[in-house]
Amino acid sequence: MTASPKDYTGFTENTTHADRVASGTIAANGSLVLKLYYDRDTHTVSFNSNGGTDVSAITGVRYEATITAPTAPTRTGYTFAGWYKETGLISTWDFGTDKVTADMMLFAKWMPNAFTVTFDANGGGDPSMASKTVTYDSTYGELATVTREGYDFKGWFTAASGGTEITEDSKVTIAADHTLYAQWAQSGSSGDSSSGDSTPSTPSTPSVPPANNGVDILINGKTETAATATTTQEGDKTVTTVVVDDNKMEERLAQEGNHTVVTIPVSNATEVVVGTLNGQTVKNMEMTESVLEITTGQVAYTLPAEQINIDAVSEQIGREVALKDIAVSVKISEPPAKTVKIVADTANQFDDVAPGAYYYDAVSTAYEYDIISGYGNGEFAPDQRITREQAMVMIARALKNNRIGGRVCKRRKGKASCRVR
């Protein structure tokens, strides 16, 4: 006699089982035992993250078994809201009670995050609304209105200078609370109809390059597009102002760690360079013992962040002004030809100061700024001791000398700016 296997949902006969007896002969007493064995089917559960990070499939899941929830995926700008049984995201999968009965796929559901957008008038009057709530990946909708006397409103941007323009139809792609800055263009002025000449002359206007919104800086020697540059004309000097993207700087400083060197290289023909970053970035650089370096074809300026002393700046302006609202500018320029000549001629002033001496540059600078004058007859006497009285006179001269760099801070409408010279 031979056994006829039956079909059971979720089970498959094990035809190789060691104890299987599928056929036999009936004994004299009429008995016969046949044995068939069945194994539970195994299945694979896959996961569709719907734009989130990948989640590995779970294999070898036995029929009608439950599964353990995998580590939740992540997605920029969204919060994970669970796994669902179908693409339409109607029925949630309960990892405690739902059982696997076939190969299957679960689908991730996401909820877009809400963020606060703050409006910065950037020199204008108070915006029609100080802030609003926006939803990631949706449009910004209505934006604040703002005016500024003598200026035309250019729009709202992600940076005070440069950045990306944001309109009502722009999608929210910044996954954090953020600020939009008003940008302005000075209004044109009409001529005076009562002026004497019937044929007015047209004054020449220096050609000024437009703002460059994608400027490379160097962070530990690695190129990073993290700044904007604007070139203007101030009198007979060309001034290039480089504004650092503080959000990118914060991210890169966290990656690079301590002793980071941030270099702002300016290669165009300019006499004056101004590097601008906010107080929070300066504080972050100070905490990591980082250094700011500004270089041009003619001048290089290196400034350890701790020397800016941003805490003292904050104290001077007022603690209620956040560090991120303090603009710190470092300005460097080519020295006047007269100054260059004075420094170059210093060696001729002192016959006993050798160009290779370790104190050569210090003596040159002190002489240039009228802090020391030597003993006359071309002698400085570098090995000569000085009295405390002489030392105090030198210090007093240095403190009173307004040609030596310093820090100037101004405050206006809850914002502050400081310039390091």
Image (cartoon, rainbow, N blue to C red):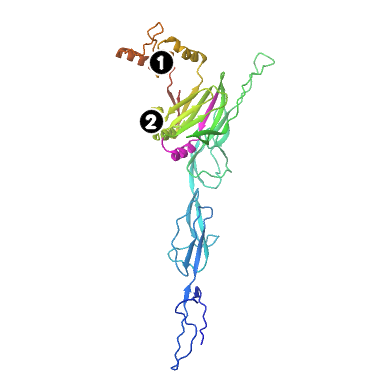
Res. 390 in view: yes
Magenta stretch: includes residue 247: yes
Nearer the observer, 326 or 349: 349
Q: Can residue 124 be seen in this view?
A: no
Tell me what residue is drawn at x 64 percent, y 15 percent. Answer: 195
Q: Quadrant of the C terminus?
A: top left
Cα separation, mark 2 vs mark 1, equals 32 Å
Q: 157 or 39: nearer the eye?
A: 39
Q: Residues within 10 Å of mark 1 (few under 14, many from 20)?
A: many
Residue 220 at x, y = what percent? 47, 35
Question: Which x, y percent locates residue 57?
Answer: 50, 60
Q: Give the range drawn in magenta.
A: 239-258
As drawn, which residue projects farthest toward the top?
Answer: 377
Query: Secondary structure beneath disc 1?
Result: helix
- Report the residue marked by disc 1: 363
Numbered circles on residues, count: 2
Residue 311 - label? 2
Residue at image position (44%, 27%) is 303
| Res 378 → quadrant | top left
SS for dot 2? helix
Up/down of 189 relative to 339, above or below: below
- Rendered position, 415 above or below 58: above
Q: How far across and down, in percent of the image, does residue 338 sit? A: 50, 13
Determine if the magenta segment contains residue 224: no
Q: Seen in the image, is 399 located left or right of residue 56? A: left
Which of these two is toward me, 96 or 15?
15
